[in-house]
Image (cartoon, coloured by chain):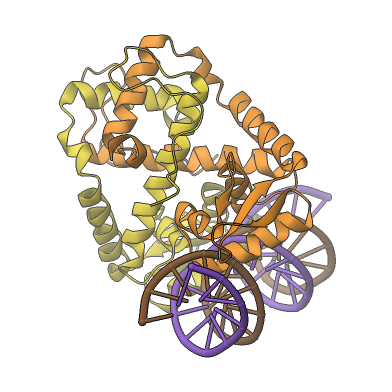
Chain colours: A yellow, B orange, C purple, D brown
Amino acid sequence: MSDTPESPGTPAPPGSPESPSPADLMDQLARVAAAYYRHFAAAATVHGLTLMQGKMLSLLRRPRPMRTLADLLGCDASNVTGIVDRLEARDLVRRETDPADRRIKNVVLTEDGERTVRAIRSGLMSDLTALERLDAGDRRAFGALLDRVFPDPATTG
Amino acid sequence: MSDTPESPGTPAPPGSPESPSPADLMDQLARVAAAYYRHFAAAATVHGLTLMQGKMLSLLRRPRPMRTLADLLGCDASNVTGIVDRLEARDLVRRETDPADRRIKNVVLTEDGERTVRAIRSGLMSDLTALERLDAGDRRAFGALLDRVFPDPATTG
DNA sequence: TATTGTTATACTCTATAACTATA
DNA sequence: TATAGTTATAGAGTATAACAATA
């Protein structure tokens, strides 16, 4: 290995009592976000799904209008058509026209889709064994810090 | 807003002293990773760059072989060719053949590329204002927890 | 008129396989 | 032989603009 990806900036030396700077934390968040998606994509690939298809399924704990899915995925509404098309072709989701507003199509998990979502979550969880090793105090602290840095709109507003 | 993305699982009620479960933290990490990339992509878009192009530039604090870039991005080597092509066409990076091993091409930031990287990082940092508001103790605790859950290969090995 | 979802289009990202050139 | 990088290909994700159906 002739080219190690050493961490950027000037992190504190091992065993030092110094705190990382905000910029150091930003770099660490970049690494963590990349690692999370690497694990998630691997868990989705096991079931022949892409990252986006896996994300989509994960959003369907309850039926959602196409439009809402676009907002939650952070992509244009036109993309959702194709992603849902491919999931529907594999019988993982269904489109159901909303009786109250016939413009809206709610996307619903099939039984196969529910099984797949559970399997992806379970596979991901078994990759994140470090979470299981945190004691209750660390979990509370970690959750609180994550929430401070990226406030949850559902919790906040 | 008729369709709120309420958090999954059974999170502790507001003000409760209860700790989130490992599964709750996994969901929170999903939310955080998505939020990080939403901010990062927005910072890259300001400069007319895609998420992958922005990621690529961010890896080039020092020159890197194409192969290493593929490993760091977690994609096939053949993709790097195209991504670097597009960045090179915009004079943000250069390819330089390694004198010691003429098979290797090191990708180097141009001055324009360096400016762009700084601008992206600065734009991202100003989106993550919550990081600036953490005191030294919280930063140290947050960094340590992030490292426990996603160990840094550079620090660990 | 406004909103939901689809289609058409063009571009980017992606993995696979086959290739060139270096080692 | 093995490795670094490229090309060709096909499929998936992406935004934009134009459109139909519904409100």
Q: In the picture, residue B126 is in which quadrant?
A: top right
- In the image, C8 versus A145, the foreground residue is A145
Left or right: where C23 falls relative to A57: right
Using the image, determine if residue C7 lies above or below residue B150: below
Quarter of the view holding residue A102 = bottom right
Position of residue B80 measured from the top left corner of the image (x, y, whole percent): 58, 62
The x and y percentages for residue A93 are 40, 68
Residue B1 position (above or below residue A41): above
Which residue corresponds to the image point at 32% horizontal and 15% vertical from the top-left? A16
Residue drawn 62% across the image and 32% down it: B121
Vertical relation: B18 (above or below) B151:
above
Residue A84 appears in the rendering: yes
As drawn, is A9 to the left or to the right of A48?
right
Which sits in the foreground, B58 or A75? Answer: B58
Residue C17, percent from left and from top: 46, 86
Tell me the residue at 47%/40% (across/down): B4
